[in-house]
Amino acid sequence: MKRVTFYVILLHSLFLGIASVSAESLPGDGANTTLDENQKINKVLPIEKAQEDKIEIPTKQGSSIRENADIKTVPGSHLGQISQQVWVINQNKQVQRQPFTWVVEDLKKAGQQPFLKAEKTSDKLEDKPKPSNKPPKKDDLENFDTVIKDTVKTGGLFTLYRNKEKNKIYLEIKPEQLNKNYLATATLESGIGEQGIYSGMPLQDFLFYLERVDNNLHFVVRNVNFRTREGDPQARSLARSFSDSVLYNIPIKSIHPQRKTILIDLGDLLLTDLAGLSSSLGVSASPDQSYFGNAKAFPQNIEVESVLNFSSSGSGRENEIPNFAVLPDSRGFTLRVHYSFSQLPDNNYRPRFADERVGYFITAYQDLTKDDNSDVFVRYINRWNLEKQDPKAAISPPKKPIVFWIDNAVPFEYRDAIKEGVLMWNKAFLKAGFKDAIEVRQMPDNATWDPADIRYNTIRWINTVDGYFAMGPSRVNPLTGEILDADILVDASFIRALKGEYRNIVQPNQLSTRTSLSALMQNRMLCTNGLGAKSNSMSPEQGQKGLFPRLSKMAGEYDLCYGMEAANQFAFGSLAMNLLQDGTTSQEQLKEYIHQYLRLIIAHEVGHTLGLRHNFRGSTLLKPEDMNNKDITHNKGLTASVMDYIPPNIAPQGTKQGDYFPTTIGLYDEWAIQYGYTRTQATTPIAEKPILQEIANQSYKPEYSYATDEDVYDLDPTADAWDNSSNVLLYSRWQLDNSRVMWERLNKRLPVSDESYSDLSRRFNTVLSNYFQQIYYATKYIGGQSFYRVQPDKTSSNKSNENASDVRQQRLPFEPVPVEEQRQALKILQKYVFAEDALNFSPELLNKLAPSRWRHWGSYPRTGRLDYPISELILFMQGSVLRDLLSADRLSRLTDIELKTQTGQSLTIPELFDTLQSGIWTEVLQPKGDSLKITSLRRNLQREYLDILANMVLRKEDVPEDARTIAWYKIRQLDDKLKQVNSKDEYTQAHLLETRDRIEKILNASLQGN
């Protein structure tokens, strides 16, 4: 049938079936006679005028086809003309025009069931309309005085008109404020206290401008990623090439007849989802149930609080709220979002170029004017605008210091430690020429300002049930990198970790998953296990919602995981205090330990708010032998930087305990602040580059070496989180010995009175977690190499410094780990992981490891097997280490390092396989006496080893061909040895025979495959 004929027939049937404009159809078989609930949102009024319309026809797949149709009078129909728009009454009980369509659900019943569907106006714009200077029609806008009647006016950056009874706030915009850049920030003022929805969390930052388009105002996020220099003709094509983002189209309510100021309903912007919570939570707030909290206007900023109510609509899984255990009723909750709209400072701030050898957060953009072969990116460091009161003085107070306010919710006993952690950085600013650059003040109990106010830098104290974190986000001018505001969040939960640990390295339900130790530990750093620790109480669907990817993003951007893992480290340190000392820990010792810990965490987060990134080489300053010598640590420092993730310093057996944590910032910290904040006489960023280059050229010194987040995933034993000393291998061996002593004393001393066996079980896991963390550091030596952020040596202005130049000439970006250190690491792994007595626990201790049985919200007891699955756990950890050492990546590195070192100076693949096989199959390769007996733990490990080699030989693993050949060769060697041994122990004899049978099938399969 031709399309025209089809539509004529359809339209004829359609018009015959329409009874009235009320959108009800005539009764018929199977036809719906009324609108469903979603279609009753708007009340339909009489049609205004006749125009063309569209017909919406559902397809078999449920989608719709719309076609334009010229509607003419059809004899016999009840309507001769169809309107494109109808007048409707919206949710605010105001009359407006809306488009509509005739909807036909079943073509066979078109004459019985069509209905008129008034469409909702979308907030999103498919195409960005062009700005219009045409004056609006007088009838389209309301009278200005009528709109603001019964409101309270507050003047400031923007003028606010508020009517609390009607839940209305109107925003007045001056004509000169259009198309001008402003900064919008959104902060979660109140949270749930669970699963990342925490009070004080930063949500969004926008550089935005307001653009008028006819009778609407667009909220537009500026694209600052691409720029041109002043006078470059390419500026004309910039807007055409790279779009800004129009987030909201806001109707203009009125325009003042004299001032020509524009009035909008702020609810159209801030009672929606400007902060992006819906995408994070997977559920939308209800606009008609949301309202405004506090609203204030100041000359440079406005502060508005939106109270958003989230509830489950019950109309589908996509509208379900995640199951939050802390809520009294999980079907709904309320969040407060604090918005700040502020004016960008006009203070002649001069951006400073970044150098990859000095660790700052950066603001980067592409300079399209650059037409040479150099890097097209321009990178500025993020820093505060500090200016000297006396520019000529070598050291001067700043004109405007950086002031941090301690939240009045912080417990009194922790305020001194917090203050010390902040002021610790003034020592670094002396190197940059500033005295008392940072100040600390106490927020009054009767303060009238909000901690989220962008004018105040605050240290906020919050409470969660699963956070255990500290974080230090800052707000930055995206054009220049100038830091405008910073807030530090401290979760009280980490103090409670003194009596337990945040989580274990392995959850019981994870044992069936085979993985490498590197993957396990690196995921652990990203809080993966921690966030999944309560997964038993959540469905898989909830785990896939947008909240967790966003939380992972926040973990990377705002240091969320530092406090989470620090709580685990803190628990291990406090447990070591109790178990490794001869006497009991006094309350004064415990108080000092907490004081040092909290001071370090605050210093670390303040460093972030000053613009500094992590430096995971900061803990390598001292030799292990010097780390408990207070004469050295108080003079030189315990670490080179507090921007590392620093574990408690636990002395080995026989050594007097020194400082647990650094008492001062490090040498790297001072150097980095010197680079970022030293004032120069240069008038442009380019002019001061030679001065900054001289500072950055000192990076060859060991105390200034820098490695950050993206560097720690390489096999670099000198750059990692939570390691310690310049000889990580020796320090880790000390901690492994400490762990063994702690396990022995756990069995003898605990549990004490008023404690349960589940407390003992948690402490056992705390020690086990630290044990395998030290093992992980040892594995990084095998096939490892250190990476240094160095640049080719250039002629230094200091001609006399020949020794320094020689050092820079000698250091290359990559340095393989010396072969002797790799062999030492293999010996440690053999002794503490693979040996028969590596993980030997007393039966009494194992029978004490009981799980908690409390069942209520926030506490979900283990079900099924209740005893500790020690065999599975040991095999899981041994297998993780073994798979790590024999991974394709590791073997490829070993192959490459042979080409990067002199002959005999590298660990080869044959040597690695031979060392592992000798240590794992010791009973067969080096039998002692006539009575051969292999324990269950060793049998499990031997099977795991054979599985890994078999997968290589059978090409189930993509490894280097040399590694596959060596695996085949080692299996042949093992088979020859197995034929020479026998055992009277039935377990062992069955194991030996089964292994020989498997080897025969593996070798035959490989021959057939070839």
Image (tube, helix red, strand yellow):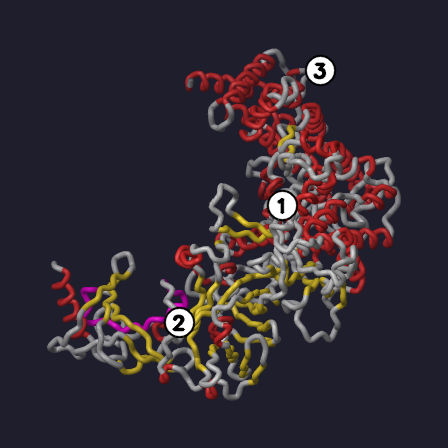
Find residue 48 and name its label.
none
Which residue corresponds to the image point at 43% horizontal and 86% vertical from the top-left?
Answer: 143
Which residue corresponds to the image point at 50% horizontal and 50% vertical from the top-left?
Answer: 366
Q: Nearer the viewer, mark 2 or mark 1?
A: 1
Count of marks overlaid on the render: 3
CA gap between label 3 and label 2 equals 89 Å
Q: Is residue 325 visible?
A: no
Q: Nearer the viewer, mark 3 or mark 1?
A: 1
Q: Nearer the viewer, residue 459 or 701?
A: 701
As shown in the figure, which amino acid type bears the numbered disc 2?
A: Val
Q: Which residue is mark 1?
A: 355
Q: Which residue is mark 2?
A: 213
Q: Which residues are magenta?
A: 107-126
Work out which quarter of the rendered image holds the C terminus and state it.
top left
CA gap between label 2 and label 1 equals 43 Å
> Dot 1: what SS?
loop
Query: Around disc 3, counting alpha carbons within 10 Å, would you say few (fewer than 14), some (14 to 19), or many (20 or more)?
Result: few
Q: Nearer the viewer, residue 580 or 790?
A: 790
Q: Is residue 141 above or below residue 418?
A: below
Q: Nearer the viewer, residue 590 or 560?
A: 560
Query: Around disc 1, counting alpha carbons within 10 Å, would you say few (fewer than 14), some (14 to 19), or many (20 or more)?
Result: some
Work out which quarter of the rendered image holds the N terminus and state it.
bottom left
Q: Position of residue 176 (x, y in %)?
A: 50, 74
Tell me, yes or no, whether the two marked residues, 3 and 1, touch with CB atoms within 8 Å. no
> Dot 2: what SS?
strand
Left-right relation of 136 to 416: left
Residue 917 covered by magenta stretch: no
